[in-house]
Image (cartoon, rainbow, N blue to C red):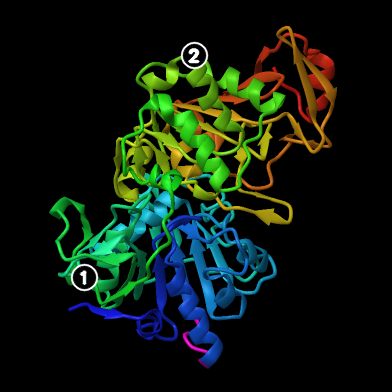
Amino acid sequence: MYKIMTPEEAVNLINDGDTICVNSFVGIENPVELHEAIYSRYKASGSPSHLTMISSAGFGLWDENRNAEGYIRDGAVDKLICGHFGAMLSTKKLVLENRFEAYNLPLGCISHAIRAQAGGIPGALSKVGLDIFVDPRIDGPGINDISKDDTLVKLVEVDNEEFLYYKLPKIDIALIKGTAADRRGNISFDDMYMSGDALSICQAAKANGGKVIVQVDKLVRKPSRPRNAIIPGCLVDAIVVVEQEPLGSGYEALTGSFEIPSGQWDMWVEIIDRMTASKRKNNAIADIIGRRASQELHEDDIVNIGIGIPESVSRYAKESGMLNKITLTVESGGVGGFPASGPVFGAMIGAASVYDMANQFDLYDNGGLDICFMGALEVDKHGNVNSHRCAGTYSGIGGFANITAKTPVVVFCLAFTAKGLFVEEENGKIKIVQEGAVPKFVDKVSSISFSAKRALANGQKVLYVTERCVFELTPDGIKLVEVYPGVDKEADIISQLPFSVE
């Protein structure tokens, strides 16, 4: 039977050495007060310590002094297993200093491994990750020098087929943020952007004899409608009520509180950008890439569009009228709306459906998307892509590996060079005014996020769209298939590459 507790009482359920699984998505839906109560307890007593933290999509607030950053920095955590580290500003720096073990696994594979554990199965099989960095034959999932755990990802063979087997430590504590608890302890997510892995995390913790701690905004007398109660009260040990300040209509637009027709998506994007203090870049490079990449869309496509330069694809899809003829999706579980970005990445404006994250990755892993548009840090002569790590920094693979693993058409959207590239467009012609100092096309990528070998074996169509040209993946490597008007093929492309292309 659940109990209503203060944050301080609830975190006393956590023991030294526990494995905590957090239901959040990059920078949203974090149970902030629970994290801060853990930090207060740790500062006062040195406990809980030697923790292992698991999160499919990472947990942070884009603020190095909030959420879990303090107790991670002060030494309470021994091991961290996440799909993405982008919003964890302090933590991702400490990882590179070998302060604790840290592992980066594909987001969807962590989600599926949690669901497997909820069903009493130690781990989950997947073809996602084969031939990229997480594959034990390549690098493995460890981010730093002390991360040597070889139990998290194993290469196995089933019915003469290769798979990766993802196995997580047993979850002892579920940390969840929900909207409301009714008098039976049932937890609804009505005012949340997503439910993520919430149910699977709770089921896994209870299967292991652990505890479920849920932070909610309010208590309600009237039970939620059965389909809206994501977590049944019988799975809950502690409910912590923390009243939230009114978020305003901009945030409510992301929770599905009211219908938003597609014609109003632009308006709400602007409102949310102002509220989150984010500013969308509107430059010639992104415009050129987005316009060309959007031409690969077809009516009735199911689509995932990555953050950064790929976001410009949606702008041109709207201008052409294609946006109303396709279905956009986001990794956290949203389908049929318009993905938000910046601090609220993972939420969706005008979603038709938001379901559990593991179900979204069922769709992605099985080739359910028709096309995806992804960014890239590096591309090599073979067509391999690095999107998650470069010298001295990293963000993590996130859902990138799952999204690109089996999607029939993969379009990478990237500038030809970085750090200083300046491009002008006039009368339909492109002029490279100043070349960037950092090449994006290299002889060999520093880490593999996307395997060209695997894509060719899968029969995927792969394009690399830049502001000056388009390459396509072939069995012989990348091939130059399109040069934009105004671009000097030899001076602006061929001579800039460290390898020869057809």
Q: Say which mark, if any, is on residue 320.
A: 2
Tag 1: residue type?
Leu
Image point (76%, 28%), residue name: 499
- The residue pinned by badge 1 equals 235
Question: Would you say residue 141 is visible in this rendering?
Answer: yes
Marks 2 & 1, CB-CB < 8 Å contact: no
Q: How busy is the neighbourhood of tag 1: few (under 14 within 10 Å), some, or many (20 plus)?
A: many
Residue 216 drawn above or below residue 358: below
The magenta segment is 45-50
Relative to 53, residue 58 above or below: above
Q: Nearer the viewer, residue 148 or 229?
A: 229
Q: Position of residue 477 (x, y in %)?
A: 63, 26
Q: Which mark is residue 252?
A: none
Residue 238 in percent (x, y) is at: 28, 77
Relative side of 500 to 265, left or right: right
| Prevailing secondary structure class for the magenta stretch in the rendered image | loop
Q: Nearer the viewer, mark 2 or mark 1?
A: 2
- Where disc 1 sits, the SS reads helix
* Residue at the outermost bottom position: 45
Q: Is residue 164 visible?
A: no
Q: Assess disc 2: are there few (<14), some (14-19) or many (≥20) residues with their C-alpha within 10 Å of its C-alpha.
A: few
In the image, residue 49 lies in the stretch drawn in magenta: yes
Q: Sequence-wise, which precedes: disc 2 or disc 1?
A: 1
Please tell me which residue is depicted at 57% across the width and 31% down the height of the picture.
310
Quadrant hosting residue 110: bottom left
Q: Residue at x 49, y 48 (%)?
A: 344
Spot occupied by residue 147 in the image (x, y as percentages of width and height):
58, 68
Residue 371 occupies quadrant: top left
Residue 57 is situated, as x and y percent measured from the top left of the image, at 46, 55
Label 2, label 1: how far apart the Cα atoms are: 49 Å
Local secondary structure at mark 2 = loop
